[in-house]
């Protein structure tokens, strides 16, 4: 993927005055539902109308999509509203049917991206297509899997590629359905700056009242677009009801979002920015120095525990520290989620240091 710029052409050619918007119901339920939502979205900023035709569910027994009949409904959407269409594909049969019904944009879901076998099957089925193909990040936070799936498609001659950031699963309880792990999305952008990156706030949040904030964060991080699940009666949707918004709410979200400039050439702005960045650099160096000093103390604790044959992990002490630091972090404007992640990483590094000493 050395020449990633050629894959950006499809988005550049659209010359959009706003971020790319992909919207529509989580699942196509009935022909009436699909067409009603499409007509409510046709005169908005929506560029692609999405609807799940096949729905991979975690457990059997839940609604798993209407199947191929839904593709005919998407064809009617295009005929009646002029909206381009999009749906998820998970195997060769899905690809063949979607191409047969002239779906304009295909995306590959998180459960598929996690398997190189599935990605290769899809790459073979899509080989040479001129359709836009977007790849969602895998369920687990593995950047290599995400990049590897895209590379397989690129090797198959698919040039109109892009990625969708939909968050990552975690066993921890957080306010998100799938934690954003923004740093992985940023690393993705650094690796392939010319590959379009779309944010899916619906799957990240799992709650409609959080969609605006996550969407704004994505735009602040220079994402190229948004995929937002939209339903005229979201509370009674057949799947993922809590994360869908009405067409009216979607329009309001798009109106309220602020599009930031990537930079500003004004001398005063750049001078202030460089000064603030210099301050950040100083503080970052201080953080590394402080953490290094902390680990030296952990080494001393490890040596003392070895001398007295005491176990490394002291659960009561750890829980007390964590509770105290969460409260201290809140007083400094730090979120509980951030403090937990930071101190768990620090604690694990301390354990590693002490275990190394005990084994020496």
Image: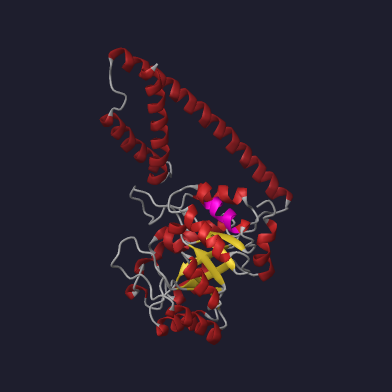
Looking at this view, name the residue that lies furthest to the top. Answer: 307
**Picture coordinates of residue 247, whole percent (x, y):** 46, 76
For the residue pair 56 and 249, the one nearer the viewer reads as 56
Residue occupying image coordinates x 28% and y 14%: 308
| 55 or 119, nearer to the observer | 119
Q: Is residue 132 above or below residue 117?
A: below
Q: Quadrant of residue 70?
A: bottom left
Q: Quadrant of residue 9?
A: bottom right
* Chief SS of the magenta region: helix
In x, y percent, where is residue 216?
52, 60
- Horizontal side of residue 263 vs 123, given as left or right: right
Do we see residue 165 in this rendering? no
Q: Which residues are magenta?
A: 146-153
Residue 157 position, x and y percent, is: 64, 61
Residue 327: say if magenta. no
In the image, residue 323 sits, relative to residue 131, either above or below, namely: above
Residue that appears at 27% across and 31% down: 315
Position of residue 56 relative to residue 262, above or below, is below
Q: Residue at x 72, y 52 (%)?
A: 266
Q: Does the magenta segment cover residue 152?
A: yes
Residue found farthest to the left? 316
Q: Along the line of sight, which residue is nearer the eye, 171 or 247? A: 171
Residue 231 visible? The answer is yes
Quarter placement of the C terminus: top left
Q: How is this picture coloured?
A: secondary structure
Q: Is residue 124 above or below residue 320?
A: below
User: Number of marks in the image?
Assistant: 0
- Percent coordinates x, y for residue 159 in the rendering: 65, 62
Q: Residue furthest bottom?
A: 80
């Amino acid at each position: 993927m050395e020449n990633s710029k050629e894959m950006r052409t499809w988005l550049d050619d659209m010359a959009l005055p706003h971020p790319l918007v992909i919207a529509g119901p989580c699942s196509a339920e009935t022909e009436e539902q699909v067409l009603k939502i499409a007509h409510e979205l046709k005169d908005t900023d929506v560029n692609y109308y999405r609807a799940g035709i096949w729905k991979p569910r975690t457990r059997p027994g839940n609604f798993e999509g209407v199947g191929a009949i839904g593709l005919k409904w998407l064809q009617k959407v295009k005929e009646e509203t002029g909206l381009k269409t999009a749906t998820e594909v998970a195997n060769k049969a899905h690809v063949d049917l979607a191409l047969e019904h002239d779906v304009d944009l295909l995306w590959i879901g998180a459960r598929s991206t996690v398997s190189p076998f599935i990605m290769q099957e899809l790459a073979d089925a899509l080989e040479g297509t001129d359709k836009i193909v977007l790849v969602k990040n895998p369920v687990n936070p593995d950047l290599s899997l995400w990049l590897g799936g895209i590379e397989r498609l690129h090797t198959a001659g698919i040039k109109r590629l892009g990625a969708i950031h939909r968050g990552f699963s975690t066993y921890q309880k957080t306010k998100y359905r799938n934690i954003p792990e923004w740093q992985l999305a940023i690393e993705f952008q650094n690796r392939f700056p010319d590959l379009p990156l779309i944010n899916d706030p619906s799957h990240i949040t799992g709650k409609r009242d959080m969609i605006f904030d996550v969407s704004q964060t994505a735009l602040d991080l220079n994402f190229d677009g948004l995929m937002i699940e939209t339903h005229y009666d979201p509370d009674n949707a057949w799947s993922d009801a809590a994360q869908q918004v009405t067409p009216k709410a979607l329009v309001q979200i798009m109106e309220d979002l602020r599009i930031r400039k990537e930079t500003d050439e004004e001398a005063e702005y750049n001078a202030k920015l460089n000064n603030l960045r210099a301050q950040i650099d100083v503080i970052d160096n201080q953080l590394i120095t402080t953490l290094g000093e902390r680990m030296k103390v952990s080494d001393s604790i490890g040596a003392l525990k070895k001398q007295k044959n005491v176990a490394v992990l002291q659960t009561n002490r750890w829980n007390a520290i964590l509770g105290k630091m969460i409260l201290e972090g809140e007083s400094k404007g730090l979120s509980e989620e951030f403090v937990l992640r930071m101190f768990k990483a620090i604690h694990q590094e301390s354990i590693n240091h002490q275990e190394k000493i005990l084994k020496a």
